[in-house]
Amino acid sequence: MTRHSRLPPNLPPRLLGMEAAAAYCDVSAGTFLKMVDAGTMPPPKRIHGSRKGWCVRALDLAIDALPDDGPGGCDGWEDVDAA
């Protein structure tokens, strides 16, 4: 049983391991670590001892701060009438 499977279905994890954090950002683990080193993604939080985890909220903020590749971005508001 994984740590995440022990959570109730309506309670998503707040911290992710490195592989899960990379998958959350849709990049490989190596690319994710390069992004952390470059400051594009946040550093991990120390959970206990050597155990580290990436805060989902911090990842969301970092993802939101990434530049858009073209007009409109990904916020979904470009289709809403300005009326």
Image (cartoon, grey):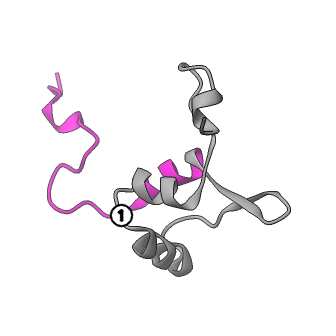
Residue 36 in sight here: yes
Q: Does residue 74 show up magenta in the picture?
A: yes
- The image quadrant of residue 31 is bottom left
Residue at left offset 54%, top offset 75%: 39
Q: Residues within 10 Å of mark 1 (few under 14, many from 20)?
A: some
Identify which residue, 42 or 20, lies in the foreground. Answer: 20
79 above or below 58? above
Left or right, 79 with reference to 43: left
Residue that label 1 marks? 27
Residue 64, position as x, y percentages in the image = 41, 52
The magenta segment is 57-83
Question: Which quadrant would the N terminus be assigned to in this image?
Answer: top right
- Count of numbered labels shown in the rendering: 1
Residue at left offset 45%, top offset 60%: 22
Q: Does residue 70 show up magenta in the picture?
A: yes
Label 1 residue SS: loop
Residue 13 in sight here: no
Identify which residue, 33 or 83, lies in the foreground. Answer: 33
Residue at left offset 34%, top offset 57%: 26
31 above or below 68? below
Residue at left offset 41%, top offset 55%: 23
Identify which residue, 35 or 61, lies in the foreground. Answer: 35
Question: Which quadrant would the C terminus be assigned to in this image?
Answer: top left
Left or right, 32 with reference to 42: left
- The image quadrant of residue 37 is bottom right
